[in-house]
Amino acid sequence: MSQILVQLASLFVVLSMLAFGGGAGIIPDMQRAVVDQYHWLTAREFLDMFAISRAAPGPGSLIVVLIGQKAAGAAGAAVSFVAMFAPSCIVIYLVSRVWHRAGKSAWRDVVERAFAPIAVGLTFASGFALLLQGSEHSVAAYAVTAVATGAFALTEINPLFLLGGGAAVLLLVGG
């Protein structure tokens, strides 16, 4: 049990420091580690936990609590939470003090412009990895994903309706 707690802590401390622009950018690495490397979850369990963490209020990075609980019970949940959020909170606190003092410095604008595409790229890569590595590889699932993505991008439809409609279509066609 203590070995799993150390593994959880070391994994989530590293991922915490890589989570530029939010937790979405580290989802593929998290999935690879917990499913393929440590075998704490199956691919389906990871996707289910990912969906729960996105539907629940709060940051999506709270998936680490679910992973920790599955791997090592309540102690695993607590270790995962602290390992994911404490290091980045400390770094952000220290950096924000420097950032605030920098005020209108030229380097500050350069850094802001440099990190924006990194955050977008990591978020895109995480969505792409989940699409390719997900447990559903049917034509119907890909079609529903494509239609929902297009509808979300081009219309003002509430995402909950798209989610419900996609689920209904897949239930009807057995995808």
Image: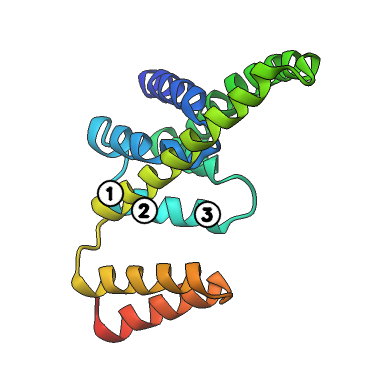
Give, as a three-letter code, the residue at label 1. Ala
Residue 54, image x, y percentages: 52, 54
Task: Identify the mark nearer the N-term, 3 or 1.
Answer: 1
Asked whether 25 or 150 is in front, the reply is 150
Direction from residue 107 to residue 25 in the image, left or right: left
Give, as a three-letter code, the residue at label 2. Leu
Asked whether 132 or 76 is in front, the reply is 132
Give yes or no for contact between labels 2 and 1 (Cβ–Cβ under 8 Å).
Answer: yes
Location of the C terminus by quadrant is bottom left
Seen at 36% across and 74% down, the residue is: 147
Residue 11, image x, y percentages: 40, 24
In the rendered structure, find residue 54 and report the number of the disc placed on it. 3
Between disc 3 and disc 1, the foreground one is: 3
Give, as a three-letter code, the residue at label 3. Arg
Direction from residue 151 to residue 169 in the image, left or right: left
SS at circle 2: helix
Task: Identify the mark nearer the N-term, 3 or 2.
Answer: 2
